Image (cartoon, rainbow, N blue to C red):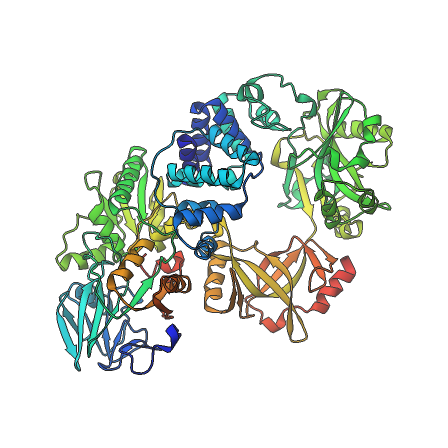
Amino acid sequence: MQTSAEGYLCTMALVQFRPEGFYVPAADVYIDPWRKVERAIITHGHADHSRWGHGSYVCSALSEPIIRHRLGKIKLNSYDYGDTFSVRGVKFSLIPAGHIVGSAQVRIEHKGEVWVISGDYKVEDDGISGAFEPVPCHTFISECTFGLPVYNWLPQKQVLSEINAWWRENQENGVTSVLTAYSLGKAQRLLAGLDTDIGPIFTHGAIEEMTQVIRRSGLSLPATRQLTDDVRKADLPLALVLTPPGATGTAWMRRFKKVSIASASGWMQLRGTRRRGSLDRGFVLSDHADWDGLNLAIQATGAENVYVTHGYTHVFARWLKSKGINAGVVETQFSNDGNEASDQLVSS
Amino acid sequence: MKRFAALVQALDETTKTNAKVSALATYFMTAPDRDKLWTIALLSHRRPRRTIKTSLMREWAAELAEVPLWLFEESYHVVGDLAETIALVLPKPSRESDTSLADWLALIQSWREKEDVVKKEEICHAWTSLNHRERFVFNKLITGGFRLGVSQKLMTRALAKATEIDESILAHRLMGDWSPQSTTFEELILSENPADALSKPYPFYLAYALDASLESLDPPGDWQAERKWDGIRGQVIKRAGSLFIWSRGEELMTDRFPELHAMAETLPDGVVVDGELLPYKEGRPMTFQHLQTRIGRKKVTKTILEKVPVVLVAYDLLEYGGADIRAKPLSERRSLLEDIVKKANVPSLLISELVPFGNWGVLTQERENSREHASEGIMLKRKDSPYLVGRKRGAWWKWKIDPLVIDAVMIYAQQGHGRRANLFTDYTFAVWSGDQLVPFAKAYSGLTDAEFQEITTFVRRNTLDRFGPVRSVKPHLVFEIAFEGIQASKRHKSGVALRFPRMSRWRKDKHPKEANTLEDLNAILALYG
């Protein structure tokens, strides 16, 4: 594990970077640990952040159904956004991160010092994941999945209207629209933005299951139907089918006669990624902050020290340093390495 | 430009050939003639020379985007394409533009004569008046290489669809030495007798690799066999007293081969000979590396002419007495060709000797002997075959010898470009010399996308050091490297240079210690170098 920033991280730091993950020694608590620990605070329900086997879990109220669904019988406490809870005198609160439903940043305060661990976040309010709130702090640990100036997103509205237009055009040509999206997060964001007047929305089992879990937490999403053998073949060319990226290469796809396959992901920004996936269309829609978003968020925290994790960390840290911010890189095991393979595990 | 940018996007968005042809055909039916002509030129490798240094483009784009140059360069490493990187980092446009494709290209051409300050002002003005997609296209017009998955053949098919002119007629019309400045759409494509027909070559007929059993070609008597040579495929044209030499890449190379000019005196008028431009000395072909020392240079000196003399090994006759004889059977064309070569009687024009064989067993033996003849293998052609256009199956086959192979350890990796940006696809390989690994070859082809993906994950987890875009990795993965030839080289640390190295197999079964050694490599050099 790397602790650059001019030896700032001594044993007295509020947050330490340990082989298990981010550790708050004063509270004996880990945040998003990747090895088994006694007490864990979890930023959001994606598999690389909420892992199986910890003694006890804390997460946001909106994350609770998701994490319980994924991890089964666990000891879990949840808090609403903004509520403060104390562990051994250290004050914690969960702040909306805008990444997926229930995602949170973790604010940690002890003896007047404030750290914020961002988890994954995006700055644009997508309408279902809560609006990202910048929190003033001394030290900010930020993701930087898309920390390069070539990653700038168009407003969600514009991308969704492109997707709807693609669906409409396919429908006119008798072609089924298959859109790949991670089953937790992106799938629901798309559902909320698709124009249901166009036609029926069918889902792959993995997406249907997760969407039902999220509906239970109170979010209202358009009607979907799991794509089983009962669905009439004649309905397929009218429909949009949501499926996880992994399903496109499988026998599951054989049911479609004429099909247009698209993906909605931040990685679609690059022509090389779009072409390599042999996709018909690539829509640039990410649940992570773009270049401007990362810079705005970091600036808004007013943090003197910034640690960057998963993404183009070395480049982004150098950029922050050139802006006069004391920046360092923390190597984590969050599975995000800038490629589509990891896309299947992590949202994008 | 909007129409052309939309075309590029449509071509980019589909992998289906029919969709590409139909997008192109629609474009050819609707675009203005000047734009169409440029589009044809761009899609037939007639992109004009670059008029601006890419280093300046990087600098100006970074400045306009307000990012430091190092950050621009880092982004470029990730994107893998300069035109795209620039299009992505620039701020949103501040206005729109209706300038046509042809006019943008005229502006880009005009930069040849202009000072850098003027170029900068004009390119920045263009960047701020084009949207993201148009910018990408505009940058590509400057830097070249669209890689749209549109071959000249596919473009010709679309043009045939749009103009209702036969595809092979169009292919012929599109050949030769024209540029959008020297002709018009009307003159080049639509008119019956183009004025510059004198130098015009025929489209080459290319063979696929033999993928069936020899027995399936029975009877052997229907076939003619020749040696396959490793030079440059070319056509020599003699019409109205003038000689023209074309390469398969459709480059007019007459001036590069003065030793062939003697043919102008002795070849009859109205003939076109298809053959191989081959470096040849003391009755024996030299290697392709030798030929490269010839093609690279504009000025052909006396020294180089003596060092690497070139001949044309004649394969076929396409035109005779001014008439196109491509439809005649090969046996007829061949006897005319033999006659012409004999009568021409110049040392730089050789006939491609037939390899006699009574049965497939004999031919199999002959193929085994290929390396002794400095040849790449055998060409099989049906004696009754016409001379077709492009790569076709059935009547012509190439039957290459198996490549040389060596097992090597991957020690460096670099990200690819374009379609392979973001993947580590370019590797450096090493063999053992004692307990040291000596790099000897680079390769970036031969694996599947899934394998590249797997190796990319390995590279990310096993990086030892970074040197700009290059990573040194733990010497752990072993690959079988196939190559066509080997030569001693002073420029390489290992002392050898390979011809066309590629990864033929990922040897997951091999421990790095089991890879070959420098001694093994030198043994191959001693045998075949």
Q: Position of residue B103 (x, y in %)?
A: 47, 28
**Residue nearest the viewer, comparing B398 with B442:** B442
- Quadrant for the C terminus of chain A in the image: bottom left
Count of numbered marks: 0
Task: Give residue B315's quadrant in the image.
Answer: top right
Q: Is residue B267 above or below residue B53?
A: above
Q: Position of residue B277 (x, y in %)?
A: 75, 39
Task: Give residue A64's quadrant in the image.
Answer: bottom left
For this view, does A93 lie left or right of residue B209? left
- Quadrant for the N terminus of chain A in the image: bottom left
Task: Give residue B296's quadrant in the image.
Answer: top right
Q: Residue at x 34, y 52 (%)?
A: A266
Q: Is residue A139 above or below residue A175?
A: below
Is residue B368 visible from the viewing direction of this image? yes
**Residue nearest the viewer, comparing B2 with B341:** B2
Q: Position of residue B271 (x, y in %)?
A: 75, 25
Q: Residue at x 71, y 67 (%)?
A: B520
Q: Residue at x 30, y 78 (%)?
A: A36
Is residue B15 visible from the viewing direction of this image? no
Q: Position of residue B376 (x, y in %)?
A: 72, 48
Q: Is residue B117 above or below residue B196?
A: below
